[in-house]
Amino acid sequence: MTTQTSPVDHELVQAATDVARTRCQGDNHTMAAAARARDGRIVTAVNAYHFTGGPCAELVLIGAAAARGVHELDTVVAVGDRDRGVVPPCGRCRQVLLDYFPAIEVIVGEGDRIRTVLITDLLPESYVWSDHQLDVE
């Protein structure tokens, strides 16, 4: 599999980094996410950790975007608190991002090796939820 990369949206990485540094305090909020909407706006969010699991920052971000009327996201990145840098989405987040935004790009990698890849490159041969829904007429 050859992964196609796109230019890195450094403004988006910085937005997530700023939220991680200023809003992620304590054990309940340890990750921040930022996404670029199709219209150029940036939406941010933090995870809501709980011993039962709780939603990751990327999942909170989807809800925060919808609450702002943003329903098309082009690029997403997650950043860890305590200057951990870019953190790739977990398996659940990869699946949800694919289901909501099948063409979304995700910023991954470490340090000077961060890159932007399609969600389908992070979840090859994916199960696509919408492909398996019955058409109701």
Image (cartoon, rainbow, N blue to C red):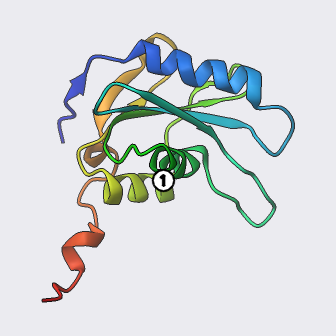
Residue 44 in the image: above or below residue 68:
above
Residue positioned 54% across, 46% down in the render:
64
Left/right placement of residue 28 relative to residue 70 reads right
Residue positioned 45% across, 50% down in the render:
66
The single residue placed furthest to the bottom in the displayed view is 137
Residue 111 in the image: above or below residue 132:
above
Residue positioned 35% across, 48% down in the render:
71
Nearer to me, 115 or 70? 70
Residue 58 in the image: above or below residue 52:
above
Q: Label 1 neighbourhood size at 10 Å, few (<14), some (14-19), many (20+)? A: some
Asked if residue 8 shows in the view, the reply is yes
Asked if residue 82 shows in the view, the reply is no
Element class at badge 1? helix
Left/right placement of residue 66 relative to residue 49 reads left
Q: Amino acid at mark 1?
A: Cys
Left/right placement of residue 30 relative to residue 72 reads right
Q: Quadrant of residue 78?
A: top right
Q: Position of residue 47 (x, y in %)?
A: 67, 45
The single residue placed furthest to the left in the displayed view is 137
List the residue tagged with mark 1.
93
Nearer to me, 55 or 122? 55
Q: Position of residue 87 (x, y in %)?
A: 55, 33
In what quadrant of the picture does the C terminus appear?
Answer: bottom left
Left/right placement of residue 74 relative to residue 66 reads left
The single residue placed furthest to the right in the displayed view is 26
Q: Quadrant of residue 107?
A: top left
Q: Position of residue 90 (x, y in %)?
A: 52, 50
Nearer to me, 53 or 36? 36
Q: Position of residue 12 (x, y in %)?
A: 46, 21
Residue positioned 18% across, 42% down in the render:
1
